[in-house]
Image (tube, grey):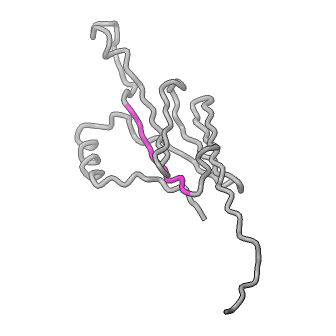
Amino acid sequence: MSMLLDRRYNPFRDFEDINRAFFGDNGLAEFKTDIRDMGDAFQLEADLPGFRKEDISLSLNGETLTIKAERHSDFEDQDKKAGYLRCERSYGSYTRSFDVSGVDTSAIKASYNDGVLTLNLPKMNRRLPDARTIEIE
């Protein structure tokens, strides 16, 4: 039986927590996902509000699926006197990886609507061998 496991172990998380407590959160926390078992497929939904479809990439490396979303700042590209009184929105990249063993990776489908990335991950067809008798020699 295959399960989608979130591969996000980070041995430096304590240091990041200390840094966040001292300097504040820059808003680039991991994006949230929901994963459902639909019987013949898994459905993964990732909240990625504020991104354009072109800012999101999906890649497979063996049995690891990686979702990456990157938001660029117009503020960084313009003169700092461009009229901004306050700039609170976060910019940078988000990345999450998932174990997709047991998924038919050639049949994965993705769509992005209203800030939600939806992936349909069909399970591999694991056909059990036909019943048979075994001769004793």
Residue most toward the bottom?
A: 137
Q: Which of 15 and 125 is in front in this view?
A: 125
Q: Residue at x 76, y 72 (%)?
A: 130
Q: In this view, does 49 lie to the left or right of 37?
A: left
Q: Nearer the viewer, residue 57 or 70?
A: 57
Q: Position of residue 116 (x, y in %)?
A: 58, 35
Q: In this view, does 80 lie above or below 131?
A: above
Q: In which quarter of the image is the C terminus?
A: bottom right
- Asked whether residue 123 is drawn in magenta, I would say no
Q: In which quarter of the image is the N terminus?
A: bottom right
Q: Which residue is drawn at 34% across and 12% down?
A: 84
Q: Is residue 41 above or below residue 76?
A: below
- Asked whether residue 96 is drawn in magenta, I would say yes
Q: Position of residue 128 (x, y in %)?
A: 71, 68
Q: Where is residue 120 in the image (x, y as percent from the top left)?
A: 64, 44
Q: In this view, does 93 lie to the left or right of 45?
A: left
Q: Where is residue 12 in the image (x, y as percent from the top left)?
A: 27, 51
Q: Which quadrant holds residue 9?
A: bottom left
Residue numbers of the magenta segment: 93-101
Q: In this view, does 41 lie to the left or right of 3?
A: right
Q: Which residue is drawn at 49% across and 30% down?
A: 56
Q: Is the magenta stretch mostly helix, strand or loop?
A: strand
Q: Residue at x 67, y 52 (%)?
A: 41
Q: Is residue 48 above or below residue 120?
A: above
